[in-house]
């Protein structure tokens, strides 16, 4: 089985910590389409690609 360089995805809490925001803000941005979200599992848990979060940081001018 080949590994296709699959990156681990971030949880809502991890993104909130990285952006120094409340988890509810991340959820709201997800709902509004400000931050691209991937839904996984039967519960529809949110996951975020690191690249998408980094691009949002660059657009806002808050690169870390």
Image (spheres, rainbow, N blue to C red):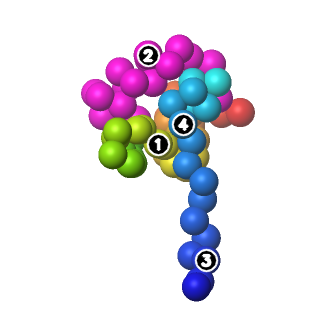
Q: Are marks 3 and 2 in contact (CB under 8 Å)?
A: no
Q: Is residue 60 above or below residue 8?
A: above
Q: CA distance from mark 3 to mark 2?
A: 34 Å
Q: Mark number for residue 3?
A: 3
Please name the residue that numbered disc 4 is placed on.
11
x 65%, y 33%: residue: 63
Label 4 sits on a secondary structure element that is loop
Label 1 sits on a secondary structure element that is strand
Q: Is residue 25 above or below residue 2?
A: above
Label 3 sits on a secondary structure element that is loop
Q: Quadrant of the C terminus?
A: top right
Q: Earlier along the polypeptide chain: callout 3 or callout 4? A: 3
Q: Is residue 56 above or below residue 8?
A: above
Q: Which residues are magenta?
A: 18-36
Q: Quadrant of the N terminus?
A: bottom right
x 47%, y 42%: residue: 47
Q: Are marks 1 and 4 in contact (CB under 8 Å)?
A: yes
Q: Nearer the viewer, residue 41 or 9?
A: 41
Q: Is residue 24 above or below residue 52?
A: above
Q: Nearer the viewer, residue 45 or 6?
A: 45
Q: CA distance from mark 3 to mark 4?
A: 22 Å
Q: Mark number for residue 47?
A: 1
Q: CA distance from mark 1 to mark 4?
A: 5 Å
Q: Mark number for residue 24?
A: 2
Residue count near mark 1 (Cα–Cα under 10 Å), binned few <14, some 14–19, many ≥20: many
Q: Is residue 26 magenta?
A: yes
Q: Is residue 54 magenta?
A: no
Q: CA distance from mark 3 to mark 1?
A: 20 Å
- Residue 62 visible within the image: no
């Amino acid at each position: 089985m080949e590994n296709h360089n699959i990156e681990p995805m971030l949880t809502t809490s991890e993104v909130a910590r990285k952006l120094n925001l409340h988890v509810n803000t991340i959820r709201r941005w997800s709902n509004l389409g400000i931050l691209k979200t991937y839904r996984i599992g039967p519960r529809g848990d949110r996951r975020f690609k690191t690249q998408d979060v980094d691009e949002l940081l660059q657009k806002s001018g808050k690169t870390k």
